[in-house]
Image (spheres, rainbow, N blue to C red):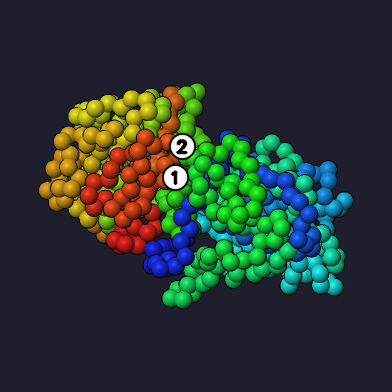
Amino acid sequence: MPLILPGNVASATAGAYEIANSCRFNDGDSPSLEKTSGTPTSGVKGTFSFWFKRGELGTSATKYFISTNDVSTPYFQMYIGTASAQQDSIRIQVFTGGTTTELITSRKFRDPAAWYHLVFSYDSTPSTPSSSSIRLFINGVQETAFSTETYPSQNAGHNFEDGNIMVGAANSGPENFFDGYLAEFVYCDGQAYAASDFGEFDSDSPTIWKPKDVSGLTFGTNGFYLDFEASDNLGNDANGGTDLGETNLAAVDQCTDTPTNNFATLNPLWRSSFDNDGTYSEGNCQRSFTSANSDRGYGFSTMGVTAGKYYWEIKIPTVARTKCGVGDATKIASFTGAFYSESTSYGMEVGTDGSISENGTTTDPFASSLSDDDIVMFALDMDNHRCWYGINGTWQDSGDPTSGATGTGDITTEISDQTHINTGEFIFPFVYKVSTSGQGDFQCNFGNPPFTLSSAVNDANGYGNFEYAPPSGFLALCTKNLGSDGG
């Protein structure tokens, strides 16, 4: 089960160029950014560069990064494919009355916990355009293995700017919206740049690719630079050109989950033998189950911890059949029967009636029951093997997450007895819809909220945005914090 791309850790980005924001595209909202292009600086040279982190996986609709015009006219398009031959591959097409350029990667891009950097550089001026002039780079390395590889004739147009240029959607149809996060989205009109113009390998860790400041590049007449730093204008061109118009994007879609500080989300790759219900949305920060289906289902975070202190919030819009907590995903994944039935398993879950289940033993309710739209707070102390649970700003059972080893009001009093935790196994936040017909919804905020906050409180390191203040010493679940305390 993939967790985090090794390159996205604090040690590799300390003192380096930082990307402050990304934009979350939730395909169910039909989001896009769009503008009409003028006469280009060059119709035969151009470069796109952007970072992406995938959201929903395994759908029937292609996920477009960018497109121009529609299928009845000359167009350019770049997307993640869904057809069997190109499932999870990146496909790039330039079409002018016939396909003049087409690249479909042999490699698949299926890790929803990782940020990828893509550069597509087009230059058809050589007498025989080839992979030396039409280049695709992923994380600083040129792709050379393609299931389809077609190059244009000399001086063939790239169609990057024919009609409207649309980010995150297809001009050709209503269902092909990108799902996930985009950051540092750049188009340089008239320039055939290499990946090294947008990023660099870390000097101390030469396999780690990280971003560079792009503001000094030449953008040309129709070029643009989307840094997503204006929440009220996500289509703002930071290079000073014409902004892109926004459709179905809002301030809450501005995120701090970026290539230089990767936040936890729920992991759509995690499956067990009975987990076959529910959908992921909002950049994998939301898990929803319909009222008509009685199947159970889980959602585990992409990041697990063995040490450190962490805080997160879960908003529950529909509370009827929901539970949430922390546990060992590798043990729960092997279950075929009752939840937490194995003696070697570990977990703590909170029920809608305020009951607590610790390692398979359920106590009578001692906390307030949950209601629709409540925000559940968790404070996990892996150094002292304790956890606290709160509702809407109040810690339950007179809990005090800062009490450390004394564990005042701690919920998981049995956690220190679990031998396998002490040997360094990973513990993950999770959500759970029980196996009874009823709806359940979870909106998980690991510091990158999928819902609007009435307040926005950071942790002590300045990371994350929460409705309620994290207890002293408890941090957002992101790579900057993982690198800072060894968790």
Residue under pointer 2 = 287
Q: Nearer the viewer, residue 97 or 270?
A: 97
Percent position of residue 79, x then y:
67, 50
Say if 145 sits above or below 441 in the image: below
Q: In this orientation, does residue 1 appear?
A: no
Mark 1, secondary structure of its residue: loop
Estimate the x, y position of residue 386 in percent, counting from the top left: 21, 47
**Label 1 crowd bin: few (<14), some (14–19), many (20+), radius 10 Å:** many
Say which amino acid is labelled 2. Arg
Please indicate whether residue 451 sits to the left or right of residue 89 in the image.
left
CB contact under 8 Å: marks 2 and 1: yes
Percent coordinates x, y for residue 162 in the rendering: 78, 50
Q: Secondary structure at mark 2?
A: strand
Q: Earlier in the sequence, mark 2 or mark 1?
A: 1
Name the residue nearer the viewer: 98 or 168.
168
Q: Residue at x 51, y 41 (%)?
A: 232
**Picture coordinates of residue 479, whole percent (x, y):** 39, 58
